[in-house]
Image: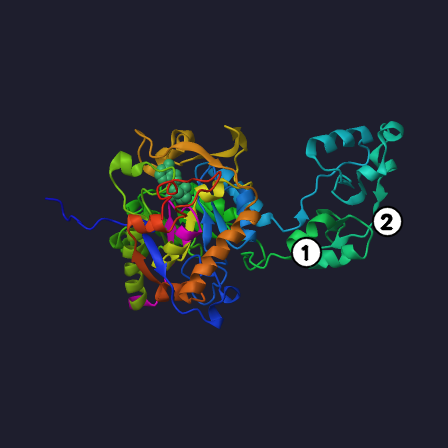
Amino acid sequence: MPKKIHFEASRTLMEFRLLPGLTTEETTLYNISLRTPLVYCNESETKYHLNIPVVAAAMQSVSGVKMGIELATLGGMAFIYASQTAGQQADMVRQIKKFKAGFVPPETVKPDTPIRDILELTRQRGFNTFPVVDETNRLLGIITKNDYDVKPHGDLPVKERMIPRKDLTVGVNIENIKEANTLLRETHQSVLPIVDGGDRLLYLVFRKDIRNHLDNPNEVLDEHKRLLTTAAINTHDYESRVPALVEAGVDVLSLDSSDGYSVFQAKAMQWIAEHYPDVPVIAGNIITAAGFDYLVEHGARAVKIGMGGGSICITQEQKGTGRGLATSIIKVAEARDRYFEKTGRYIPLVADGGIVNAKDVTIALALGADYVMMGRYFARMDESPTEKMTIKNQVMKPYWGEGSARAREWKEIRYNQAQFVEGVEGFVQYAGKLRDNLPETLAKIKASMSSVGAQNIREFHKKAELEVVSALSIREGQAHDIYMPGQDNTYNTTNWGN
Ligand code: IMP
């Protein structure tokens, strides 16, 4: 006989609906906060928070530098994938930590460079403003396409046509975009060079960029006003990977495994606690209360839930392991609440795998998750690291599992085996910029919280009342019995009568 058989079927997110509670003046859309802890925080660690409850999955086709920067700017975070060398991953973290909104690392030229070469550089790079510096990086001037004409000036050196340093307004050691804006406003320049006390060039701030960067109230920042970063790690090479990531400035580490209920995760956490006690670790994935208790006992400061539900995941098919995400969240949230009552430590839960849209995010949060991780959702955006392509007249982006053949040798590390794949590769429909998609998703989440009468996510956990729905009820909830040109009319052709 097996140790235990659970005869009640496990549930998926799509089987639940929320019942409305009382909406009040305090719970209208504008009063709702989506701020949520990234990991367990004590009083002095307020930086470990997200301002929106979504993170991008640690996957090659999802979370690189661009996603890391844009999502943290908008209030969430991308977990930088571990399926690359430690050096490459640390370099990604470094680029995100160095990023300052609106402060562009400059591409410089030397005073004796011929103007003809500048033209070639402009063609290659797609921009036309080049600061001119000497051997020690001291600013000598700036040259843009308005300063030359190739026919008469092509053979001249840059120094003959540049705007010299003495005629430029520059910012000295400015770190704040608002200050840069104030200075730039007083000039006729389209760009403000930022230099250090020795006149050495640090950044350029472009007038055209400023508006985009002045208004990011949700940015998640560390104590030095740099974007917050989380990097995934594995249980095989953490002794060499973690030092490289910490050196690059990583804020949080996330143990990334399809089955995290293992002594290997406990050992990795113990090693990190000994060597880097200030770096919090998120562990997982688990789908049982026992898994939660084990990881938290060994130091996990947030726990990731989910096995077998990802859009590219075939673990359930291949190994027969897994559980519906809704049931997984419910069981783990019960264990989390018990642990909180006992110790006063609130461990955030991350729901991961198979979360398709705002409605799924909402149900996951209502059931007890503090934020969700998504791969497919973010793979569709401009900021994912893949190239767009056209397939059957539709613009698509490739998306593949970390356990697919395309993830190559790294799949063996996340899945602890080399003999078979646990993920597939395919395409997702291109959706455009993250900035143009995320607000709608967040507005829907807030609208659900408003209906329930919850001002924030912790209150949502306490007030949410959910009901399992029947298949017919799900059908009733979709458009039906009307014909909609160009739409999926699955339920629309059966009932044309009275
Ligand atoms: P999605 O949001 O439904 O696309 O699921 C993304 C999640 O699937 C990731 O965060 C991982 O937990 C999981 N995942 C990533 N790659 C694989 C794989 O190859 N097999 C199984 N699960 C995967």
Q: Is residue 359 magenta?
A: yes
Q: Residue furthest front?
A: 498
Which quarter of the figure is the N terminus placed in? top left
Q: Is residue 59 magenta?
A: no
Taking the spot 74% from the left edge, 50% from the top edge, the residue there is: 207
Q: Residue furthest bottom?
A: 25
Q: How is the model colour-coded? A: rainbow
Near mark 1 (Cα within 10 A), the count class, few <14, some 14-19 or many ≥20, is some
The nearer-to-camera label among 1 and 2 is: 1
The three-letter amino acid code for the residue at tag 2 is: Asp
Q: Which residue is mark 1?
A: 177
The three-letter amino acid code for the residue at tag 1 is: Ile
The reply to whether the residue tagged 2 has its Cβ within 8 angstroms of ligand 1 is no
The spot of residue 69 in percent (x, y) is 56, 48
Q: Which residues are magenta?
A: 342-361
Callouts 1 and 2 close, C-beta under 8 Å: no
Above or below — where is 421 with respect to 190? above
The answer to whether residue 236 is seen in the rendering is no
Q: CA distance from mark 1 to mark 2?
A: 22 Å
Taking the spot 58% from the left edge, 54% from the top edge, the residue there is: 226
Q: Which residue is mark 2?
A: 167
Task: Answer with the quarter of the image where residue 490 lies.
Answer: top left
Decide which of 206, 466 is in the foreground and name it: 466
The answer to whether residue 344 is seen in the rendering is yes
The spot of residue 251 in percent (x, y) is 49, 53
Near mark 2 (Cα within 10 A), the count class, few <14, some 14-19 or many ≥20, is few
The spot of residue 28 in percent (x, y) is 49, 67
Considering the numbered disc 1 on the image, is that residue within a helix, a strand or a loop? helix
Taking the spot 50% from the left edge, 56% from the top edge, the residue there is: 443
Considering the numbered disc 2 on the image, is that residue within a helix, a strand or a loop? helix
Whether residue 419 sits left or right of residue 151 in the image: it is: left
